[in-house]
Amino acid sequence: MVSTTPLFERHEARGACFVDFHGWRMPLHYGSQIEEHHAVRRAAGAFDVSHMGILDVQGPGSTALLRRLLANDVARLGEPGRALYACMLNDAGGIIDDLIAFRRAADGYRLVVNAGSAAKDLAWIQRQCPATGVELRTRSDLAMIAVQGPQARARTAALLAPGEAAKMLALPGFGAAAIDIGNQAAFVARTGYTGEDGVEIMLPGAAAGPLWDALIDAGVLPCGLGARDTLRLEAGMNLYGNDMDESTTPLESGLGWTVALGDGREFVGRAALEAQRAAGVARKLIGVMLDDRGVLRSHQRLRTAAGDGETTSGGFSPTLNRSIGLARVPVAAAGAVDVDIRGKTLRAHLVSPPFVRLGRAVTAP
Amino acid sequence: MASNIPTDLRYTRSHEWVRKNADGTVTIGVTDHAQHALGDVVFVETPQAGRVLAAGEACAVVESVKAASDVYAPVAGTVVAANGVLADAPERVNSDPYGDGWLWCLAPGEDAAATALLAPAEYETLVAGGG
């Protein structure tokens, strides 16, 4: 049984090439993935990301629950209208999922989780949930459109009533607000998965089509999951299931910055992370640039002076016109490495991600 | 999406095309159907001149944004030339699969004539059947 989003017929009408992604039939590209990638780096692109899981957590116990379930601390959020990126861990410190947590009210949060993990996340949260004081609600009634690129906010604002446009343009990074779009209540966040400025818009499924059409009329290019993957890879952002999973901790996944250990707060996985840190973290996630001609893919063996590692993601970077990837390697690994690609040994070197940020190549240190 | 299948070529089940040249050599590439299925091509590795190929041997690699795909020798023979343009312009495989996007040129071996290739109508049936 494959699910489709409220925009499926529109994707079909535009001649999208589809891919089945964690039970969802989603656009891979609409003709050229590389053109879509460049549109986001240079102007604006729109992604149907309605397959992502949206879970509202409400009630007087919601802050305490999320402070225990997430390795980042929602108490850092302060006022409603702010968001943070966090990992949800198991007892061993392994990553159950990565997500964005939005504070929408004093006692109300919205979690946006990966499509492939949504069912597992809900089951885990339900098991940890107290009998009273917290209400969980999956929002499969909502669609989600990501508008990304240097022109994304301006072109979206042009579609809104003046007061609503001003509200949207005033959002800081990782800020979010209830904003009306064509008389429909939407929730708009200044977040994304591309390394560019932009917004992600959650709104009722029936309202998604008219917004999608208006964005395209405003010169925003429809983009598929293919471009979404090369954009996030250039931005050095992890993909759950590739670069991290339940067998890896945030400390081994370049996500130590998302773990709030400072305040003695008890959260699931804390003891395991502290033990790992005390024993010394053996592996790290880092960027790889291929120096020879070819294309890095996931699960290729890397040989470094400090021992072997493996690529976790790989592909072609349209911005840099060369192949890049992420790899898990021994913590001391640095500099030049060899990579086994289809029976050949090619030269590559390790770099700190991101590779590209706000349309520009980032010079590796 | 309808594929372009020129009527003056022969085809394989693995989506290569074969053109017989006046000098007795054959030119080989991947079909329009194949390039469309692959998506944007970003890297092509072609066999070196002089290499002797058996029919069905994997001898070239076309890497797209999606995946790496082997390309097989449709007939046995010796490579006489490879398309050097693809090193800097791999996207020619997408934009002109039967022209500028050709992969390599082969002098067929003695037993090459015995290799069964598909006529255009047969290849069209294969593609229409989801092959």
Image: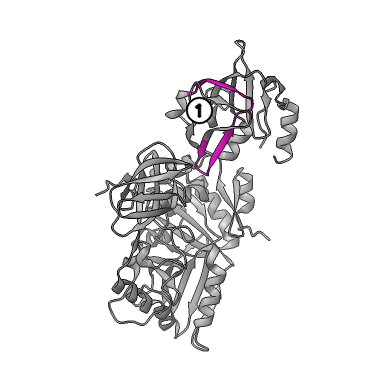
Q: Nearer the viewer, residue A348 or A319?
A: A348
Dominant secondary structure (helix, strand or loop) of the stretch shown in magenta: strand
Helix, strand or loop for disc 1: loop
Identify the chain of the residue marked 1, using the numbered disc in the image: B
Q: x, y percentage for residue A258?
A: 34, 68
Q: Is residue B61 left or right of residue A288?
A: right
- Most distant residue in the bottom direction: A132
Q: Disc 1 residue type?
A: Pro
Quadrant of the image occupied by residue A90: bottom left
Task: Give the residue pinned by disc 1.
Answer: B47
Q: Nearer the viewer, residue A41 or A10?
A: A41
Position of the C terminus of chain B by quadrant: top right
Position of the N terminus of chain B by quadrant: top right
| Structural crowding at the residue carrying mark 1, measured as other residues with C-alpha within 10 Å and reported as few (<14), some (14–19) or many (≥20) | many
Q: Nearer the viewer, residue B43 or A117?
A: B43
Q: x, y percentage for residue A252?
A: 36, 64
Q: Is residue A49 left or right of residue B120?
A: left
Q: x, y percentage for residue A41?
A: 39, 45
**Residue A141 in view (yes/no):** yes
The scheme the figure's colours follow is: one colour
**Residue A319 in view (yes/no):** no
Position of residue A68 relative to residue A316, above or below, is below
Position of residue B81 relative to residue A111, above or below, is above
Residue bounds of the magenta highlight? B62-83
